[in-house]
Image (cartoon, helix red, strand yellow):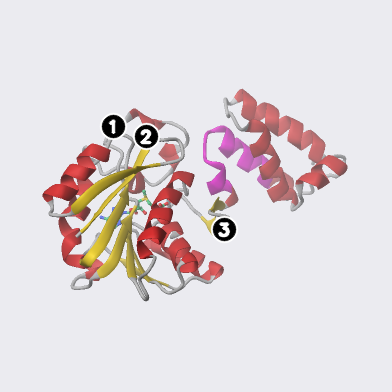
Amino acid sequence: MRSLGENWRNAQAVLTGAGIDSARLDARLLLEYLAGCRYTDLLMAPEKILESPAQQVFDALLARRAKGEPLAYLLGEAEFRGRVFQVSPAVLIPRPETEVLIELALEKLQGLSAPKVVDLGTGSGIVAVSLALECPRASLVAVDLSQDAIAIARNNAGRLGAKVDFREGDWFSPVAGERFDTIVSNPPYVADGDPHLALNGLPFEPQMALTDGADGLACIRRIVADASVHLNPGGWLLFEHGYDQGEASRNLLTAAGFKAAVTFQDLAGIDRVSGAFI
Ligand SMILES: C[S@@+](CC[C@H](N)C(=O)[O-])C[C@H]1O[C@@H](n2cnc3c(N)ncnc32)[C@H](O)[C@@H]1O
């Protein structure tokens, strides 16, 4: 057993030695989580002892973080749009750039009295849950191929008070014969073998959430090809994609009969979401 101060110093040294850029912050968040305290408590009472078994758990989580496992998986939660979502290695960790997709969908839903929306590849449920909470007149369906992801997403919707109809299956299969006013998706879009898959904790995330196992556009091609029969007239398809997939996405949309295909940038000015209406 060691004091909070000793643990904090030691954890920073371990994580810095392991090449973790956010060593100081991660050490602090892990310690707050295990000690059940706030930052001010760490500063005000560094001599307080971290009792057993919290000390053993802290050491184990620190060792996992030092091996590159993302902090969100160790804490079991991640923040998105000011809300805390449960996460596990069965789901992608929410990325702030996905907020672009939410903002655009909210814009397209303006003026519709009771819109129907489907979120394809819902993962932890961040897109469907955010839209359900921020556009309460919309009814949300959310689809994922992963049973484990659906369980996490359903739990998040319950905890956050969002009404979402979750369905397990392959892209549009669970919504056969149904039409929507907006289709949103953040599909896997990293190409097979892309060197980024080996970096920044990505090996710990579900590969089926990251890569299509092909050229990066395989899931987008399928979604674009099948979307029009699931949209009401004037309905929008909006999907997130990689920094270099804007032009290819617009071409796919136009070839599938969509109108006014357009690509939107994220706050860093990077092509992030493409969409069009039918
Ligand atoms: C990039 S993640 C997005 C997760 C979440 N929407 C987000 O933005 O954080 C892609 C999701 O698509 C799901 N997925 C992959 N292939 C699928 C398929 N054929 N049908 C439905 N969902 C699929 C994965 O399980 C994963 O949850």
Q: CA distance from mark 3 to mark 2?
A: 27 Å
Query: Label 2: which residue?
Result: 197
- Crowding around mark 3 (Cα neighbors within 10 Å: few <14, some 14 to 19, many 20+) is few
The amino acid type, in three-letter code, at marker 2 is Leu
The amino acid type, in three-letter code, at marker 3 is Arg
Residue 104 horizontal/vertical position (percent): 38, 54
Residue 73 part of the magenta-drawn span:
yes
Dot 2 lies on which element? helix
**In the rendered image, the vertical position of residue 16 relative to residue 241, given as above or below:** above
Dividing the picture into quadrants, the one containing residue 123 is bottom left
Residue 9 horizontal/vertical position (percent): 75, 31
Whether residue 111 sits left or right of residue 18 in the image: it is left
Query: Label 3: which residue?
Result: 83
- Crowding around mark 1 (Cα neighbors within 10 Å: few <14, some 14 to 19, many 20+) is few
Residue 247 part of the magenta-drawn span:
no
Whether residue 2 can be seen here: no
> Which residue does the image show at 55% across and 47% down from the upper left?
72
Query: Label 1: which residue?
Result: 193
Mark nearest the camera among 3 and 1 is 3
> How many numbered marks, from 0 up?
3
Question: Looking at the image, is mark 3 or mark 2 earlier in the sequence?
Answer: 3
Question: What secondary structure prevails in the magenta region?
Answer: helix
Give the extent of the magenta segment.
Answer: 57-74
- Residues tagged 1 and 2 counted as in contact (Cβ below 8 A): yes
The amino acid type, in three-letter code, at marker 1 is Gly
Q: CA distance from mark 1 to mark 2?
A: 7 Å
**In the rendered image, the vertical position of residue 12 relative to residue 122, given as above or below:** above
Dot 1 lies on which element? loop
Mark nearest the camera among 3 and 2 is 3
